[in-house]
Image (cartoon, rainbow, N blue to C red):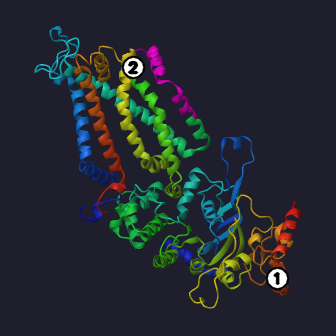
Amino acid sequence: MSTTDTDSTSEQNDSTAPPRELLRTAGLKKYFALNDGLLDRVFGETAHVKAVDGVNLTVRAGETVGVVGESGCGKSTLGRTLTRLYDPTDGSVIFDGEHIETYSGRDLKALRRRVQYVFQDPMSALNPRKTVGESVGKPLEVHDIASGTERTDRVANLFEEMGLMRSQLDAYPHELSGGQLQRVGLARALITEPDLVVFDEPVSALDVTLQAQILNLINRLQGEYDLSYVFISHNLNVVRHVCDRIAVMYAGEVVERGTTEQLFENPQHPYTRALLRSVPSVRERHEREREELPGSPPSATNPPSGCRFHPRCPEFIDGRCVSEAPETRSVAGDQGHEVACHWAELSVEKREAHTPPDGAARETIEREGASGEK
Amino acid sequence: MAEYDGAERTLGVRTERLRQFRETIRGDYRATFGLTIVVAFVLAAVFAPELAPYDPMAQDFAIMQAPGLNAHPFGTDSFGRDLLSRLMYGARISLGVSLGAVAIGGAVGVTLGLVAGYFGGWVDDTLMRFVDVLWAFPWLLVAILLVAVFGQSVWNVVAAIAFAYIDDFARITRGEVLSIREEEFVMAARNVGLDDTAIMFDEVLPNALAPIIVQFTVLVARAMLAESTLSFLGIGVKPTTPTWGALLGQGRGLITQAWWISIIPGVAIIITVLGINLFGDALRDALDVRERGGSP
């Protein structure tokens, strides 16, 4: 207890300095090989699914960073790669000052104690043949933290803290409800008192009243256990509720990042804007129609040229969108807000005067852009 | 189920699991029946010298091929030897060889399949090509080779039969493991910090047991007949040693004159297999927590 006291006072002393960086990824890539047959291996030319393609993400101590995007944009893969459940294809992951992308064996095991991943579907993430108490107590055994009655006590106490009953220690996963199982999932992640927890859609499998309960629990635990979160979700309402900063992912890349306020009040990327427009809202139901984003997420094996969003972009600018991948740049006058879009260079007047080309004109641009690139 | 009794219970302690397991097994008539048969036969085999009414080798030419009499309840064979006594002594070889061979073959095969399926890639390719070679090898030739090199003994019979069943177990286990390793709880175990060995044996294998148990019960029956095949070819145990397979083989030619010589050992094999199968079924269900009744 005394250590936490000194920690908190030291933090108060230099409150002007930003909190320390807990996790940073640089150019993180995760490709999955397709066509794993013998002939493909012999004759080379393996196709890859570029699930995560060069992501930079920073998590500071005590904050919650949201990762949002459509299904298949690579956000779960990102979460699993930065927790080392997947081995990165390229790039680095720096956790607490150490390069963890090359960790293995004992180092990796020690890391597991400090970095935890909470699965989307708690039912499938629990061994059906083990009681939930056993599953939650397992990390204590693996990391040699507690045994015997001490282990039982710690698990039981955490169960109670999660809103579960002591008697449910001996239940099997199929005997519990979805909400209870997610509490078990949280308990298993927190039993080793980690520093960083990655949540992969922790509430999307739950009904709305349970979602609120679990989100409040997640929020409360962050303060109590001094945790940093990465919160992966497709649900913008949920993300807005829990996150300090947000990264928007599209086709394996981060297209925009900023604080929750920046992103919701001043979205810069056409994709972010489209996502926000598609959010169902109770308050504004009569004022505005929900707009759907046309098309479906692009192929991750062979992503579109230039800006990966250009085939679906409702604000399509010109040939550059097709031929030139936009760099990530800071949004002027908005500190910490970054966007990867050619818009960012244009003046506000120019933007407002712009009408996206459509139909044949757009097709011509796309064709020329694609051939110009080659 | 008894009321929750607080502190006395600890997390999934083995004794608690075992107790639950025993309760389930006891409540299952298949298990009771199957286990009774198997235990009875095993006891008869173990205590054959004490229980058998005659010396299994003693010939009595006065009563050759006699049907069941008071003195010889199962009759006698063509040399006037008591069939009941031969059956009891035969159980020692038949049960020992079949259970032992399947257990050894199973242990090797399951391990191979588990490792191959779990790691995949070149490990899988290498191990399964090795298993293919085992499969392509005629096990009778292996048996002949073993006998030629090491001489005739029960151990060679066990080894030859075990060898023949490795590939069955390896393939079945690998198939199960291939699907189980994709389950999220396996990744969750990695997330917790378990290493590959612990994940394989602690998380994956228990979920792959059902078809392995079924395979075990099926192969025990086949192993008894395999042993008789070897005896028939003269590369099994010594010809005069009674085994169920050998008894069956000797009586086969006499089935029209003295049916009991072949039918009675056959029935013994059937009953044993039935018992093992019933027990295996009950075991499989008892190991599946979802099949268990009652609330937590």
Residue range corresponding to the magenta coloring:
B129-152
Check disc 2 and report the residue beneath it.
Answer: B230
Q: Residue at point 17% right, 23% down?
A: B50
Instruction: Name the foreground residue: B280 vs B45.
Output: B280
Task: Please give the label number shown on residue A266.
Answer: none
- Chain for mark 1? A
Q: Residue at point 59% right, 77% down?
A: A239
Q: Secondary structure at mark 2?
A: helix
Measure how far apart labels 2 and 1 are at the Cα level: 87 Å
Decide if residue B188 is on the left or right side of residue A277.
left
**Of the residues shown, which amino acid type is indicated by label 2?**
Leu
**Is residue B184 visible in this depiction of the protein?**
yes
Instruction: Name the foreground residue: A295 vs A223.
Output: A295
Instruction: Name the foreground residue: B12 vs A15.
Output: B12
Q: Residues within 10 Å of mark 1 (few under 14, many from 20)?
A: few
Where is residue A277, by image quadrant? bottom right
Where is residue B270, by image quadrant? top left
Check disc 1 and report the residue beneath it.
Answer: A355
Query: Above or below — where is B149 with respect to B5?
Result: above
Q: Position of residue A83 (x, y in %)?
A: 60, 61
Q: Is residue B137 magenta?
A: yes
**Of the residues shown, which amino acid type is indicated by label 1?**
Thr
Farthest residue, direction front: B256
Q: Is residue B160 magenta?
A: no
Q: Residue at point 58% right, 34% down?
A: B129
